[in-house]
Image (cartoon, rainbow, N blue to C red):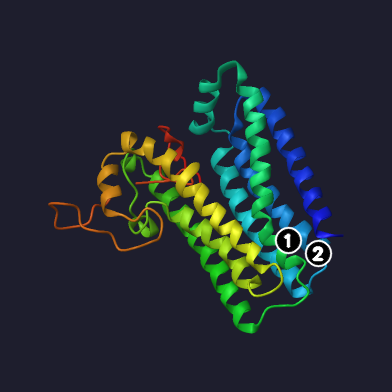
Amino acid sequence: MPVTAAAAFAFAALVAVFFVVWLVQLRTRNAGMIDPVWAFSLGAVALFAAMAGRGAPLNRAAVALAGGAWGLRLGVHLWRRNHGAPEDPRYAALRNRWGDAASRRILGLFVLQAGVSLVLSLAFFVPAWQTQAPSIVAIVAALGVGFAALAGEAAADRQLRSHLADPANRGRVCTRGWWRYSRHPNYFFESLHWCAYTVWSIGQPWGSLTLVPPCAMAWLLLKLSGVPLLEARLIHTRAGYRDYMATTSAFIPWPPRRAAGSSAPVTGLHRNHGQDAHDRDEPRERP
């Protein structure tokens, strides 16, 4: 199948799946379930690209394994977090702001997410159609980046989940594990995951296109739908979060700075992909 036809089919399938989720949220008034469906569906696109691709078998196997494992892990995590929970505050706020137009605009938002998914899918389609496998050095480097990203994000999720499960931590900032070194380690490792496909494909035909997904993901998380919205809430809902912002890297894990007038780094909680735990009273989280 030509790559353009495969991409068009994938986009149509994503729109169809997201439309079904939109129909469900008309009844449940909970748009948050789009998050796990998004992860599962994008993992499915990786499997589809691997099957439909005309590239080297090793390339297609790598896409299937990396993209499928990523989508399964993140989808299960998000499903466990969102299923049976009240609507995510982001969607609830949009629903309230949009009023009578909410249903129509949420549909537009879901279609936009399908478009974002297609952009990210460049990471799958490019290597799946490349006829030459990468060098051993590139393979080892790509596998190292991919494993570090998957393991790091899973560890950050687990650390925050453990923090939120303790009632004594309610309303506090999580600084255990990776959260000591980054305010959004899950965002960092999520973006790092998409770099693995670039390491695998760069230097081959159309390989430069695989730079788009990690850059797009980092921009979305840091400038649009991730950090700005999340931290605007957290400074009002998490004790000590302003100090946490002053001492802790926003993205790349890095040793914490010392707070002004303090002899020790600030410790304390975070996640939307982070620490707000849906900004609800019960201990929940989401990547």
On the image, the x and y values in percent for residue 5 come to 83, 53
Above or below: residue 149 compared with residue 259: below
On the image, the x and y values in percent for residue 132 come to 75, 77
Q: Is tag 1's residue or tag 2's residue first in the polypeptide sequence? A: 2
Q: Which mark is residue 125?
A: 1
Quote the CA–CA distance across marks 1 and 2.
7 Å
Give the left or right position of residue 212, taking residue 158 as reference. Answer: right
- The foreground one among 49 and 66 is 49
On the image, the x and y values in percent for residue 8 come to 79, 49
Q: Name the kind of residue labelled 1 in the image.
A: Phe
Above or below: residue 118 compared with residue 228: below
Q: Measuring 73% from the left and 34% from the top, which residue is drawn there?
A: 19
Q: Measuring 48% from the left and 62% from the top, which residue is drawn there?
A: 152
Is any part of residue 37 visible from this angle? no
On the image, the x and y values in percent for residue 173 come to 32, 45
Above or below: residue 229 compared with residue 157: above
Callout 2: SS: loop
Q: Measuring 36% from the left and 38% from the top, which residue is drawn there?
A: 234
Q: Which mark is residue 225?
A: none
Q: Are marks 1 and 2 in contact (CB under 8 Å)?
A: yes
Give the left or right position of residue 24, taking residue 5 as reference. Answer: left
Q: Name the kind of residue labelled 2 in the image.
A: Gly
Which quarter of the picture shows residue 193?
bottom right
Callout 1: SS: helix
Circle count:
2
Q: Within 10 Å of the Cα at label 1, are there few (<14), some (14-19), or many (20+) other Cα atoms?
A: many
Give the left or right position of residue 151, taking residue 227 as reference. Answer: right
Question: Pointer 2: what residue?
Answer: 53
- The foreground one among 274 and 99 is 99
Quadrant location of the N terminus?
bottom right
